[in-house]
Image: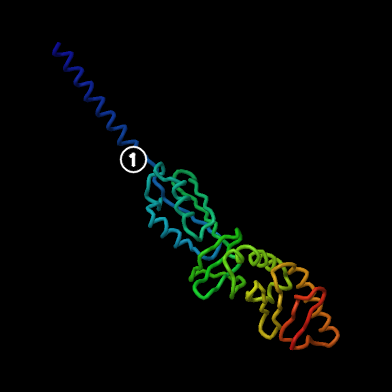
Amino acid sequence: MRNIYRITGISLAVAAIVAGVIWASSGEEEEICREVNIETSGSFLTEGQILSELRRMNLYPVGTPMRRVSTQAIEDGITSNEMVRGATCYKRGDTIVELYVEQRTPVLRVLSDVETYYVDTDRKRMPFCQGGRADVIWVRGRVGEQMAREEIADFAVWLNGDSYWQPRIRSIEIREGKQAVLLQSEGEPVILLGRMTDYEQKLHKVRLFMEEMSTNGGAVPAYRELDTRFDGQIVGRY
């Protein structure tokens, strides 16, 4: 009987040793993340800033076993940044993590007496970033957030697609009664647009008016403002 017990004990000891060897071997062969590649659109967040964000949230994958790298956690963490529209993260091969970050795209900057912010292509409010560069039209004056996100954002998108007016109109001023005034490049007359409706037709008439004046007189008269608020006509004031 003692021999049986002795054999059983030896067998258990051998099994434990074998299991330990297998565990150690598997641990040594576990794949570690060696590289994270970041691609991003937009000009607000750099690759370095995104890496800093990952470290701050304890999501930086390099040096972590691949099985413990959560691509979903990385996506959720990065998209929590207000400058980010979306993120896609996935593993490539046994040691590489790929991350694509889509930044939000502003179409309009709002300046008021108390704050400044952007409105993006999704018509959502976007915080102003001091370090980022966005060459977008500005709007000042009596403009509420709803108006900025709706009528003015629509106008800004249209303006970006118009090769004639986009380089000419630099900013918008909203006066009492939601009356819009378009400020052109220096030396050009301001355009009294009125309500932000029918602006395509109004600006088409302004363009024809300016081209006609230039053709007939050799130069556009030095008008101080062009008023489009009257049906079917443009009124020029010195």
Percent from the top left, x then y, of residue 194?
Answer: 70, 74
The residue to which callout 1 is attached is: 28
Residue 57, by quadrant, is bottom left
Outermost residue toward the right? Answer: 216
- Considering depth in this image, is 172 or 53 the residue closer to the camera? 172
Q: Secondary structure at mark 1?
A: helix
Q: Nearer the viewer, residue 8 or 130?
A: 130
Q: Quadrant of the N terminus?
A: top left
Query: Within 10 angstroms of label 1, few (less than 14), some, or many (20 or more) residues?
Result: few
Residue 157: image x %, image y %? Answer: 66, 64
Residue 165 lies, with reference to residue 67, above or below; the image says: below
Where residue 84 sits in the image (x, y, percent)? 51, 58
Q: Is residue 52 left or right of residue 171?
A: left
Residue at 49% over, 50% down: 98
Q: Residue at x 82, y 87 (%)?
A: 218
The residue closer to the viewer here, 69 or 108, is 108
